[in-house]
Image (cartoon, rainbow, N blue to C red):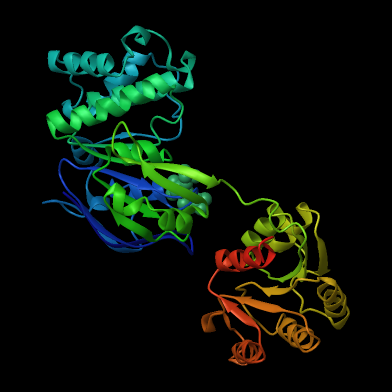
């Protein structure tokens, strides 16, 4: 019903979704999971044609690509329960739900009996009838989510798209909404495409789950049982979980083992070479895990500099937009030599201004400092090959290359574990 073909999308130059392909079938409950910022809401927007893909396309069977379909046409096919609160607050709840009938009305036509019946039914199903005359601005967050669901139900579109639609609801209403979705799906072949952070609910009701990773690509796609495995969830969320069978529903049930791994690196001391935001995630995660972190040199105002300063790290700062001076390199060398665990090089872009950091790493390596390099890539070399050659030499001299920050942190943890 909805074909997604090698879809990629970015805001500006930053890609947030990469190579997404699948077909969502009629009558399917399809859930998109993933960490914050992994592109779930963006994917929903691409599916309903609000955004135009950078590559690939979305096709609703028998129609033009989604981004070329008109709004009214899309509204006949797809009803949306949004994540963010919309500013229709001057309307009453009933008026708001009536807006769901927009796609069914002729231009300037009033409300028909059919419209009125659809609105009443939607409000009854979503338990919002008693709120009908209240201004939307006066209802609670959970009640407002039910109003949005009512508006979407009133639209009577074959596909219902929900973006974290039950996140503010109490347990009773959340269960009720879950059952409602299942009932609509079973009795009326309603296709449901939803974004959720509720893994247990997703496991319980989804026919298929798409799990996105932090880089906006698919970590796993398939049945809840195939997708919700400890390895996949670790890969996407960086969290260790156990998965067991829910004794009441038979669906997989997720149990965090170590929800976060804070304070596990508290006796380590590490110097980080980054720049241009390449080390931000690494700096933050090392800090959260309790490691003593220093970094630099970094140009003033660089996003890694701003973050390191905000976290109170020792930072060697060079003025903005200038090459690193010998004096600042000497200071960084001193900090790095004092970092007893070692030096780690983030996947930064290399130019003639920061190439000298690789010479510093070489000297430290020769002096016995451990050096790690995270995900070095030739396309990050803007020096005509010198940086790539220096990185290769570091590797030959004994620096350890790791694919990503997760692998680096895992290595530190395993070396730092009390069992070692
Ligand atoms: N209009 C925009 N302009 C620039 N960047 C954006 C815009 N909308 C979203 N982004 C960025 O794109 C990335 C993906 O955002 P998106 O809202 O799709 O993530 P998500 O997986 O739904 O996150 P969450 O679980 O937090 O709701 C994020 O890094 C976000 O900051």
Residue 108 position in % (x across, y down): 21, 22
- At horizontal 46% and vertical 42% (from top left) the residue drawn is 255
Depth check: 84 or 178 in front? Answer: 178
The extreme left residue here reads: 62
Residue located at (65% from left, 57% from top): 285
Pinpoint residue 171: horizontal percent, then vertical percent. Answer: 42, 23
* Residue 156 seen by the camera: no
Q: Quadrant of residue 245?
A: top left
Q: Position of residue 93 (x, y in %)?
A: 36, 15
Quarter of the image with the C terminus in it: bottom right
Q: Residue furthest front?
A: 419
Q: Is residue 202 visible?
A: yes
Of 305 and 322, the residue lying toward us = 305
Q: Horizontally, is 338 left or right of 359 in the view?
A: right
Residue 119 place in picture, x, y as percent: 23, 17
Q: How many labels were placed on the picture?
A: 0
> Residue 195, relative to residue 348: is it above or below?
above
Task: Work out whether 347 lies above or below 180.
Answer: below
Q: Is residue 295 left or right of residue 331?
A: left
The residue sitting at 81% across, 74% down in the picture is 336
Quarter residue 252 falls in: top left
């Amino acid at each position: 019903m909805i074909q997604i073909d090698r879809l990629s999308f970015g805001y500006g130059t930053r890609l947030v979704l990469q190579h997404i392909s699948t077909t969502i079938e009629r009558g399917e409950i399809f859930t998109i999971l993933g960490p914050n910022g992994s592109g779930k809401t963006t994917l929903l927007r691409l599916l309903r044609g609000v955004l135009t893909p950078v590559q690939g396309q979305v096709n609703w069977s028998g129609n033009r690509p989604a981004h070329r379909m008109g709004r009214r046409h899309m509204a006949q096919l797809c009803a949306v329960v949004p994540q963010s609160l919309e500013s229709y607050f001057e309307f009453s709840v009933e008026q708001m739900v009536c807006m769901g009938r927009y796609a069914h009305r002729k231009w300037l036509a009033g409300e028909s009996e059919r419209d009125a019946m659809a609105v009443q039914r939607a409000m009854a199903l979503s338990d919002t009838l008693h709120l009908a005359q209240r201004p939307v601005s006066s209802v609670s967050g959970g009640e407002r989510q039910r109003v949005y669901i009512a508006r979407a139900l009133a639209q009577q579109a074959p596909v219902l798209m929900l973006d974290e639609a039950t996140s503010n609801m109490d347990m009773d209403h959340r269960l009720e909404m879950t059952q409602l979705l299942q009932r609509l799906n079973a009795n009326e072949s309603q296709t449901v495409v939803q974004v959720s952070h509720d893994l247990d609910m997703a496991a319980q009701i989804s026919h298929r789950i798409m799990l996105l990773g932090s880089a906006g690509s698919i970590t796993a796609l398939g049945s809840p049982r195939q997708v919700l495995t400890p390895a996949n969830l670790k890969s996407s969320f960086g969290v260790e979980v156990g998965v067991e069978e829910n004794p009441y529903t038979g669906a997989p049930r997720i149990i965090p083992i170590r929800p976060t791994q804070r304070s596990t690196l508290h006796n380590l001391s590490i110097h980080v070479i980054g720049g241009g935001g390449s080390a931000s995630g690494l700096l933050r995660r090392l800090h959260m895990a309790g490691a003593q972190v220093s970094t630099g040199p970094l140009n003033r105002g660089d996003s890694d500099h701003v973050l390191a300063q905000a976290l109170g790290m020792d930072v060697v700062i060079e003025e903005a937009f200038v090459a690193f001076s010998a004096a600042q390199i000497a200071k960084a060398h001193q900090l790095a030599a004092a970092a007893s665990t070692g030096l780690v090089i983030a996947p930064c872009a290399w130019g003639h201004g920061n190439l000298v950091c690789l010479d510093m790493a070489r000297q430290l390596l020769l002096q016995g400092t451990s050096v790690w390099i995270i995900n070095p890539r030739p396309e990050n070399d803007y020096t005509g090959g010198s940086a790539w050659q220096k990185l290769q030499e570091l590797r030959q001299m004994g620096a350890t290359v790791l694919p990503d920050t997760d692998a680096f942190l895992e290595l530190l943890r395993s070396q730092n574990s009390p069992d070692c």
